[in-house]
Amino acid sequence: MIIKTKYGTIDSDSIKGNSEGAKFLKDNANAAEIFFADDIKIDLDEEDNDIKDSVIELLIENKYTYPERALALADETDTSFDEIKESDWGDGKIFDKGTDEEWLVLTDDEADKAAVENFENTLDEVGMFELFDENLQNLILENDELIDNAWFDEYMEENTRNYVDEIENESVNDEPEEGDYLNRLHEELCNAGIIDEPEYPELPDEDDENYDKMKEKYDSYIDKLNDIIEDNKEKYVDTMISNYDNGVEWYRDNFGDDALKDVVENNDLADNKKIAEWVFDNDYTTRGNELASYDGTELEINVDYKGENYWFYLYRTN
């Protein structure tokens, strides 16, 4: 005999055990058989809750991989278990309700993991520069835990040192005079206030009787000035770098946004897993947005099943 309830249908021959629900259903089935009925409909709404819960257990305990999840979906959507089926590929966590609804039923930890993985996959597919606006991009780029900014810092330092070496070799003339600099580095060091402006000794004509003595003094000054320049190269590198908060800012200022994006993408500098976790931790998106593709809504429900209490989070996916 088929027994029909608001919560689902069961064959009386499949009812095992001596629970209150089993006894209740068997008694009703036996009574119905007296009238040669092939099926019977039982209204459980007014029955004792213990009997109702026990009947529900009988309806679902052998029907689902995770019956407690099916119970959560049935309660939240007021649906009979006859309409709720587990998807074969869902590992007991995805359910079809009727013919047009698919639901994901997860624990809190499972929802966190699934949402982060879903967002990470999106990042892998389209990249952070397509997914985020400029403000969020900048927040991520400046976060050393999300982007390997060491690449930019090292490149900034190397590039700046190369620049300083290059301008040191750009000489002005062989015998600089008042107002001249030994090279471009000398000029920039003076302009930056790192060293004083030069005060060259007077150099007389070569036929002057004091020329040799004055030339020696002049050459000594030039040697000393070269030593000063050399000693302050590193300080100038640090001064130039200190104008920027980090290598990312320096790179963008010198090469532009497009070049910056190319470096991040071509060198895999973004940690998409950490970015995905960071996005959720800072409330830039929600689990509902990522998992409930139908409407972006997360439903929270608490159910009791076989003496255990469960919290589940439901997401409609189609």
Image: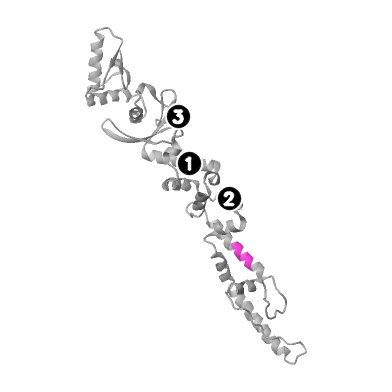
In this rendering, is residue 73 above or below 223? Answer: above
The residue pinned by badge 1 equals 119
Labels 3 & 2 near each other (Cβ < 8 A): no
Judged by its main secondary structure, the magenta piece is helix
The residue pinned by badge 2 equals 261
In which quadrant is the N terminus drawn?
top left
Q: Earlier in the sequence, mark 1 or mark 2?
A: 1
Q: Residue at x 36, y 39 (%)?
A: 108
Name which quarter of the figure residue 198 lies in: bottom right
In this rendering, is residue 302 above or below 166? Answer: above
The residue pinned by badge 3 equals 89
Q: What is the x, y in percent for residue 292? A: 44, 35
Disc 3 vs disc 2: which is toward the camera?
Answer: 2
Q: Which residues are magenta?
A: 158-164
Q: Give the camera-side residue of 254 and 67.
A: 254
Picture colour scheme: one colour
Disc 3 vs disc 1: which is toward the camera?
Answer: 1
For badge 1, the amino acid type reads: Phe
Asked whether 220 falls inside the magenta stretch, the response is: no
Q: Residue at x 27, y 19 (%)?
A: 43
Q: What is the x, y in percent for residue 153? A: 55, 59
Q: CA distance from mark 3 to mark 1?
A: 21 Å
Outermost residue, top side: 36
Q: Earlier in the sequence, mark 3 or mark 2?
A: 3
Q: What is the x, y in percent for residue 5? A: 30, 19
For badge 2, the amino acid type reads: Lys
Packing grade of label 1 (10 A; few <14, some 14-19, many >=20) is many
Label 3 element class:
loop
For badge 3, the amino acid type reads: Trp
